[in-house]
Image (tube, helix red, strand yellow):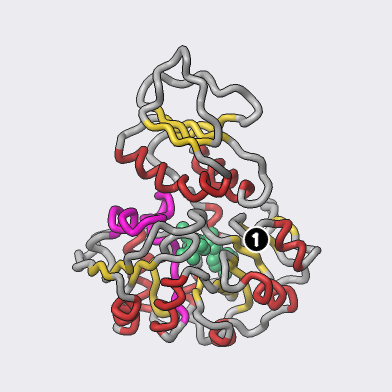
Amino acid sequence: MKILAVQTVITISPQNAAGFIKRGGIVAFPTETVYGLGADVFDEAAIARIFEAKQRPQDNPLIAHVATKEQIQELATDITESAERFIRGFFPGPLTVVLEKSSKVPLTATAGLDTIGVRMPRGELAQRFLAACGVPVVAPSANVSGRPSPTTWRAVAEDLDGRIDCILQGEATEIGLESTVVDCTGEVPVLLRAGAVSLAELQAVVPGTVVYEASDLDIVRSPGMRHRHYSPGAKVVLINYELPITNYELDRVAYIGLRTPETQSLPLPVLTRVCSSVEEYAHQLFEFFRECDRLKIHTIYCEEVPETGIGAALMDRLRRASER
Ligand code: TXA
Ligand code: MG
């Protein structure tokens, strides 16, 4: 598809960035998870431009971002008891709740689904931007589909410069992985995507919450999870954290993990990133993948982590990146 080039304005002013949304434009903005690419939830033409700019598959629904809890009423008809508890417990924060959508929300936003994902970011710049927009803003991650989500404004520019109207320039994002997504439309909440809010934290608020398990008979609950994601150009190889780290390939390799790799008998990786905690690892991962692509790395060795806390989300992204 041919995309008409536009001038991408880079600004540090949330008011300036919100002006583009009000005029029907598409704007990348930082949240505490990753940068999003936003449009007015009620503007179908702008939403169509998001799909075009990202080259996003048409069947992948968008998350609506709100500045206030009142805005949730505009988006959803039935705020279930479980959703209410999650909203009370985790908004603003890195959690998306899926609810029955209201008739005001166009189907272009939800890729034809009768549900909508809603989230209230806690990042200060995101909150000022959303407040200035005055409407809920639908936003997928601000990367070209299939690439790692952007955690810096430079990563956004790398993928989308000349395809979007504006980038709201902020710091590197705090968490670095996308939000937890939980479907609250049924009797029992279903965790669709792991994120910084862990299953245990959700269960502390609604004990029955379960993890989604795909079965052939089931309808696809979270279409985005079908698509290839979070992938650098390099091959990603996972290393078990209980085993010694050896067996490197010799050429153009990189390493990221919590431990220093044992490289006595082998050449040093071109790029080595030893992280001080699982949180730091999550924070660094996507930008590290992009850095590896810039350096034309062939193989990235990623150390596995225990699947507790944000470790579950990190392992989810690592597994997806290692699938070919
Ligand atoms: O942290 C985040 O969630 C970031 C920031 C920008 O908010 N956004 C983000 O959006 O990661 P995106 O589009 O890259 O991923 C959205 C995920 C997809 O897996 C999608 O299928 C799922 O959320 N999703 C969105 N709406 C849904 C719905 N109505 N039902 C089920 N899954 C939904
Ligand atoms: Mg995405």
Looking at this rendering, what residue extends furthest in the top direction?
265
Q: Main secondary structure of the magenta part?
A: loop
Residue 52 pos. (x, y %)? 33, 64
Q: Which is more toward the observer, 116 or 37?
A: 37
Residue 66 pos. (x, y %)? 51, 78
Residue 6 in view of the camera: yes
- Residue at figure coordinates x 38%, y 32% from the top left: 271
Looking at this rendering, what residue extends furthest in the right direction?
207
Residue type at mark 1? Ile
Q: Indicate yes or no whether the magenta region holds residue 158.
A: yes
Residue 136 pos. (x, y %)? 47, 80
Which residue does the numbered mark 1 point to in the structure image? 219
Quarter-of-image position of residue 118: bottom right
Q: Indicate yes or no whether the magenta region holds residue 192.
A: no
Q: Is residue 261 above or below residue 12?
A: above
Q: Specify the segment rendered in magenta.
A: 136-160
Q: Is residue 113 above or below residue 240?
A: below
Residue 24 in view of the camera: no
Q: Is residue 240 above or below residue 138?
A: above
Looking at this rendering, what residue extends furthest in the front direction?
276
Quarter-of-image position of residue 117: bottom right
10 Å neighbourhood of mark 1: few (<14), some, or many (≥20)?
A: few
- Residue at figure coordinates x 30%, y 82% from the top left: 19
Q: Which is more toward the observer, 62 or 238?
A: 238
